[in-house]
Image (spheres, rainbow, N blue to C red):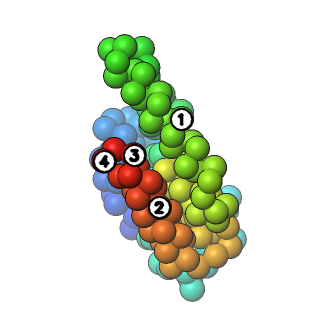
Amino acid sequence: MAELYARHARAIYSLAHAMLKSPQEAEDLIHDVFLEAWHRSEHYSEARGSVRAWLLMRARSRALDRLKSNGCQRVLALESCPLDDASAALGDQLRLRELLCQMPDVQREVLLLGYFEGLSSVEIAERLGIPTGTVKSRTRAALGALRASLRGRHE
């Protein structure tokens, strides 16, 4: 572990600091990542990438978890909008929910995991047990369908 730490801690710190904007949070995250690596080393597979890539992916995931738990939201708070803007935002949210419900399950699933849980294509592929390329093609198709539906509404 000492050798892994010496070799990869600086890269993990740089990633964590860039994402979290806090030296202390970045230091805490390094500790968490190496602790997780120690306990979950059996999940590493050389066939899927380098140790560095595996550790950085874990660091990115943990940083996203921290950002979400610290109250960073991907949803617009309606109280912060003027009344007309709040009505429009609510209408857009309802329309988006409707469009998501209408799309095929496999497309909706990759969008929800990617945009609302913050997972990367690789993480989505691992979770669903499908190739990364399939995740990307489903995402592209889903976003294309959303774009086309929303473009028709705003024209």
| Residue under label 3 | 153
The residue closer to the viewer here, 64 or 121, is 121
Q: Could you tell me if the residues under marks 3 and 4 are in contact, i.e. CB atoms within 8 Å?
A: yes
Mark 3 neighbour density, 10 Å: few (under 14) some (14–19) many (20 or more):
few
Q: Amino acid at mark 1?
A: Leu
Kindly report which numbered mark, 1 or 3, lies closer to the viewer in this rendering.
3
Residue positioned 44% across, 54% down in the render: 149
Mark 4 neighbour density, 10 Å: few (under 14) some (14–19) many (20 or more):
few
Q: CA distance from mark 1 to mark 3?
A: 13 Å
Question: Which of disc 2 and disc 3 is earlier in sequence?
Answer: 2
The residue closer to the viewer here, 152 or 15, is 152
| Residue under label 4 | 155
Above/below status of 72 relative to 150: above
Mark 1 neighbour density, 10 Å: few (under 14) some (14–19) many (20 or more):
few
- Disc marking residue 145: 2
* Secondary structure beneath label 1: helix
Mark 2 neighbour density, 10 Å: few (under 14) some (14–19) many (20 or more):
some
